[in-house]
Every structure is written in structure tokens, then in C-alpha cells.
Amino acid sequence: MENYRFDPYTGRPLSPPSMPPRTWGAYPPRGLPQAAEPPLSQSPAEQSNVIVTRVADYDEAKAVPTDFSGVLRLMLDWSHGYIYAKAVGDDGIPVFRKFRFEPEAPAPAPGTYLTIEEGTRLIREETAAAMRAMREEFASAQPPVKELKEPPEKNSGKGSKA
């Protein structure tokens, strides 16, 4: 487990100890001496505090493990138009947020506004016109009612309570 330690400040794994190149025999390899390669680790000023990944949906974003080193993880969900963010809060509890860009509705063109009085008058006119049209349609759909007949007189025979 010695090879898999983590740096306590950055949270990144420490590189395993480098081994000298293996020689085949007692003599070093022939050729020009090679310059040592610069280390691949970044300086603290160059290290990014954001990890960006792509996810398929909300459930996958929730299932991504939280990085407890304090690095913000942004997860892009292009198919649904969301960006999810996951990080550790100040109290040590993971924080998950989702963001979505929704453009504002365009403002109506100037001069199309109504005053309250104009709007009320317009609503009353439209309502009266709709009521007239409904009455005309109802009157034309029903046959005229014939004279009403008097109801038959009540039977005062057996079983009636009158």
C-alpha cells in the first residue's frame, strides 16, 4: 500500500517511487546519456480546482462519487440541457446543485399595452358578443315550445292522500 499514498494538501495520488532503469548485465547501456525528464506533476498555481465530466442524466450525476479534496466537479448533461455541480460544503457534507439556462421571454413591443379601463371595456364587449352568439345558437337549435298543457287533476281515489 506504500505505492498508493495521497498528498494531504491536494488529494492527488503521490507518484510511486521511481526505479532505476534495468540493465542487462554488469555494464550500463551504451549510447548518449539521456537528460532526466521533468516531473509531470503541476505546481500548486497550475493545479485546477475544477473537474469537468459528461453525464447522461440526473441519476448518473447523483451517482458520481464526491471528491472530498475540495475540488468542484462539474457534470455536463447536454441531452437535457443541465449542468450539475458537486462539491464538499463548508461543514463537510456533499453539496449537489443543478443549473439550467432558460432565456427570458421577449418583451412585448412598445405600444401594445392596455390601460385597466381599456382592458375592462374590451373584456365586457367580448363577453357580451359571446353571450349573444350562444343565445342565437341555442335558440336556433331548439324547436319552439308548444303551448303548455294543464297537468291532469289529481286522483282522489283509493291510495291518494289528498
Image (cartoon, rainbow, N blue to C red):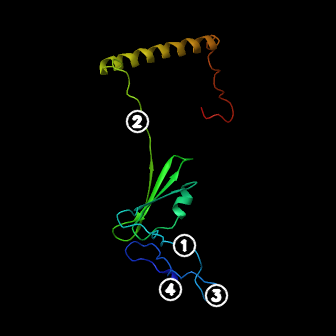
* Residue linked to disc 2: 104
Q: In this view, does 162 lie above or below 45?
A: above
Sequence order check, earlier mark of 1 and 3:
3
Alpha-carbon distance for marks 1 and 3? 18 Å
Location of residue 18 with respect to 132 vertically, above or below: below
Q: Is residue 84 among what the camera can see?
A: yes
CA separation, marks 1 and 4? 34 Å
Distance of label 2 from label 3 (alpha carbons): 74 Å
Say which label, 1 or 4, has the lower sequence index: 4
Amino acid identity at mark 3: Gly
Residue topped by disc 3? 25
Q: Are marks 2 and 3 in contact (CB under 8 Å)?
A: no
List the residue tagged with mark 4. Answer: 2
Q: Of the residues under marks 1 and 2, which one precedes in the sequence?
A: 1
Query: What is the CA distance from the residue labelled 3 to the residue labelled 4?
Result: 29 Å
Local secondary structure at mark 3:
loop
Figure label count: 4
User: Residue at 53% of width from left, 13% of height from top?
Assistant: 133
Percent x, y for residue 134?
54, 16
